[in-house]
Amino acid sequence: MLKTFICQPDFGTNLYNKMEDKKLIKKALIDWVNEHTPEEQEKAYMISSSGSYSLLKIKEEVENETEFGLELADMMIQLTIDLLIRGKRQLS
């Protein structure tokens, strides 16, 4: 049942906005960025169709709740749920 729910087209787009406490997701992503050294934070970390993003840029996007920041938070939620469903404790 949950797997079907995850596959619904609007699941990722709307989940972050429906969360009661968006601050927890933002804090987790920001804390994760802060765990990296300043040098690591400045290097390009991911590339998307809209450009490349350093960890600092990702942090800024999440803090400011931009479209990219919200999409990233949604993807993290989806990944977490998927890993939990499959009983994974780490990516491999």
Image: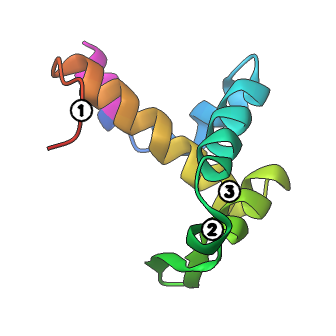
* 19, above or below 29, in the image: above
Q: Nearer the viewer, mark 3 or mark 1?
A: 1
Residue holding disc 2: 41
Nearer-N-terminus badge (3/1):
3
Q: Is residue 10 visible?
A: no
Q: Is residue 82 visible?
A: yes
Nearer-N-terminus badge (2/1):
2
Indicate the position of residue 92 as horizontal and vertical percent values. Answer: 14, 44
- Of 3 and 52, which appears nearest the observer? 52
- Of 10 and 80, which appears nearest the observer? 80
Amino acid identity at mark 1? Gln
Residue holding disc 1: 90
Residue holding disc 3: 69
Query: Magenta segment range?
Result: 1-6
Amino acid identity at mark 2? Gln
Nearer-N-terminus badge (3/2):
2
Residue 3 magenta: yes
The chief SS type of the magenta part is helix
- Of 1 and 74, which appears nearest the observer? 74
Q: Residues within 10 Å of mark 2 (few under 14, many from 20)?
A: some
Classify residue 58 by image quadrant: bottom right
Amino acid identity at mark 3? Gly
Q: Quadrant of the N terminus?
A: top left
Classify residue 7 by image quadrant: top left
* Separation of residues labelled 3 and 1 (CA atoms): 23 Å
